[in-house]
Image (cartoon, grey):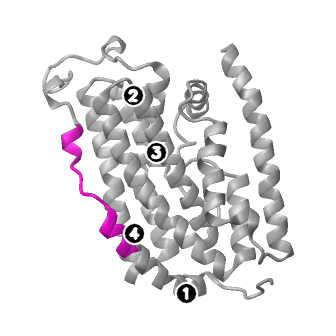
C-alpha cells in the first residue's frame, strides 16, 4: 500500500505538533541536570598573558595528541555556532507553542557544551587560546544555514547530525587520555543522544504521514551529508588527522550513525513506499556501499600514514 497524500510544511508542523509535545514531555522527564563548572580543573589553571600578566600559551604545555587537539577544536567551534542553529530551527519550526518551547530548551542545553569545553581547554592549557578565539570569530562570523529549507530535510539532518555529534564527542573523550576530559565529553554526548532521540522519533512520525517524501528527504541528506563545522579554518586537514586517529571517520559514520538510524526508522524494510520512496531507498543503499568502499581505501591510506 502506498500513500499519495501531500503535505505542505505548514501541514506537517500542525500534524506533528502533538507528537512533538509528547516527545518534549519525555525529554524533560529524562534529561539530567548537570553543571558545566564542575568539569573544569580550576585548581590547575594559571593566568595567561594580557591584563593579568600571566604565562603565554606554548605548545609544550598541552598533553594532548595533535589529532585529539584537532577534534576538540572542531567539536568546540561546531558548538560555538549555536546562534545560527537556533535561528535556522526557529525560522523553520516557529517559536510558538510546543515548537518554541522545544527550541528554547534545546538551545539552553546546547549552550552548556561550548561553555564547558572552552573552560576545560583554557584551564588545562590544552589549546592555543589566541588561535582558538580567532577561529571562533571566523566561524561564528560566517554563520551556518541548512542546505535545504524543507521541514523534512531539516528533521532528517538534525537526526543524523545529533548522532554524529554524539559519536564525535564520545570518541574524542576516550582518546584524550584524561579522565576528567572523558567525563565531560561523555556528559555532552549524553545530551546529544537525547536530542537525537527527539528528532529521530519526530522524523519517524513524519515517515508515517508522508513515507515517500520523508524517505526521499532522508536520502538527500544522507547522500549529501556534511557536518556543520566544515567552514572551520583548516577543516579538511583536521578532519583527515581526526579520521586517521580513529576518532571519527567514514566507517564510524556508516556503522555508528547511518545504519542505526536506518534500522530504528525501518527504512530498508518498509512496505508502504511508492516509486519515489523506492528510488530514494535504492539511493541510500548505493550510498552505503560507496561509503564502505571509500572507507576501506582510506583505512589503507591511514595505515600508511
Neighbor class of circle 3 (other Cα within 10 Å; few <14, some 14-19, many 20+) is many
Query: In which quadrant is the N terminus drawn?
Result: bottom right
Indicate which disc, 2 or 3, sits on the residue closer to the N terminus: 3
Disc 2 and disc 3: Cα gap in Å? 15 Å
Point out residue 63 in the picture as x, y percentages from the top left corner.
35, 17
* Magenta span: 24-39
Neighbor class of circle 1 (other Cα within 10 Å; few <14, some 14-19, many 20+) is some
> Which callout, 1 or 2, points to the residue nearer the camera?
1
- As drawn, the label of residue 15 is 1
Q: Determine whether 45 is above or below 143 in the image.
A: above
Q: Does the CB distance between marks 3 and 1 fall below 8 Å? A: no
Q: Determine whether 21 is above or below 236 in the image.
A: below
The answer to whether 53 appears left or right of 96 in the picture is: left
Does 32 appear in magenta? yes
Indicate which disc, 1 or 2, sits on the residue closer to the N terminus: 1
Indicate which disc, 4 or 3, sits on the residue closer to the N terminus: 3
- As drawn, the label of residue 131 is 2
Indicate which disc, 1 or 4, sits on the residue closer to the N terminus: 1
Q: Determine whether 204 is above or below 282 in the image.
A: below
Instruction: Identify the residue at image location x=23%, y=46%.
Output: 36
- As drawn, the label of residue 186 is none
Identify the residue position indicated by label 4 in the image: 103
Q: Quadrant of residue 301?
A: top right
Q: Secondary structure at mark 4?
A: helix
Q: Nearer the viewer, residue 298 or 174?
A: 174
Point out residue 8 in the picture as x, y percentages from the top left corner.
65, 84
Q: Secondary structure at mark 1?
A: helix
Neighbor class of circle 4 (other Cα within 10 Å; few <14, some 14-19, many 20+) is many
Residue 150 visible in rendering: no
Amino acid at each position: 500500500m502506498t500513500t499519495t497524500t501531500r503535505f505542505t510544511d505548514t501541514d506537517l508542523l500542525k500534524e506533528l505538533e502533538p507528537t512533538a509535545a509528547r516527545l518534549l514531555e519525555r525529554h524533560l522527564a529524562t534529561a539530567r541536570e548537570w553543571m558545566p563548572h564542575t568539569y573544569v580543573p580550576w585548581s590547575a589553571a594559571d593566568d595567561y598573558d594580557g591584563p593579568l600578566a600571566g604565562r603565554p600559551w606554548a605548545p609544550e604545555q598541552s598533553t594532548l595528541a595533535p589529532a585529539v587537539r584537532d577534534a576538540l577544536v572542531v567539536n568546540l567551534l561546531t558548538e560555538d555556532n549555536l546562534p545560527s542553529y537556533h535561528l535556522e530551527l526557529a525560522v523553520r519550526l516557529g517559536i510558538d507553542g510546543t515548537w518554541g518551547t522545544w527550541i528554547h530548551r534545546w538551545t539552553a542545553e546546547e549552550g552548556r557544551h561550548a561553555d564547558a569545553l572552552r573552560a576545560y581547554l583554557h584551564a588545562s592549557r590544552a589549546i592555543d587560546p589566541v588561535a582558538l578565539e580567532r577561529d571562533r570569530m571566523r566561524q561564528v562570523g560566517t554563520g551556518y544555514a541548512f542546505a535545504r529549507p524543507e521541514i523534512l530535510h531539516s528533521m532528517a539532518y538534525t537526526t543524523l547530525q545529533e548522532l554524529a555529534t554524539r559519536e564525535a564527542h564520545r570518541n574524542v573523550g576516550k582518546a584524550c587520555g584524561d579522565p576528567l576530559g572523558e567525563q565531560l565529553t561523555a556528559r555532552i554526548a549524553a545530551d546529544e543522544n537525547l536530542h537525537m532521540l527527539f528528532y529521530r522519533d519526530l522524523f519517524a512520525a513524519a515517515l508515517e504521514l508522508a513515507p515517500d517524501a520523508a524517505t526521499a528527504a532522508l536520502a538527500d541528506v544522507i547522500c549529501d551529508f556534511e557536518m556543520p563545522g566544515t567552514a572551520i579554518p583548516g577543516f579538511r586537514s583536521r578532519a583527515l588527522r581526526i579520521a586517521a586517529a580513529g576518532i571519527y571517520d567514514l566507517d564510524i559514520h556508516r556503522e555508528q550513525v547511518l545504519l542505526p538510524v536506518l534500522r530504528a526508522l525501518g527504512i530498508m524494510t518498509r512496505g508502504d513506499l511508492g516509486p519515489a520512496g523506492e528510488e530514494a531507498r535504492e539511493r541510500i543503499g548505493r550510498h552505503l556501499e560507496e561509503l564502505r568502499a571509500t572507507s576501506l581505501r582510506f583505512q589503507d591510506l591511514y595505515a600508511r600514514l
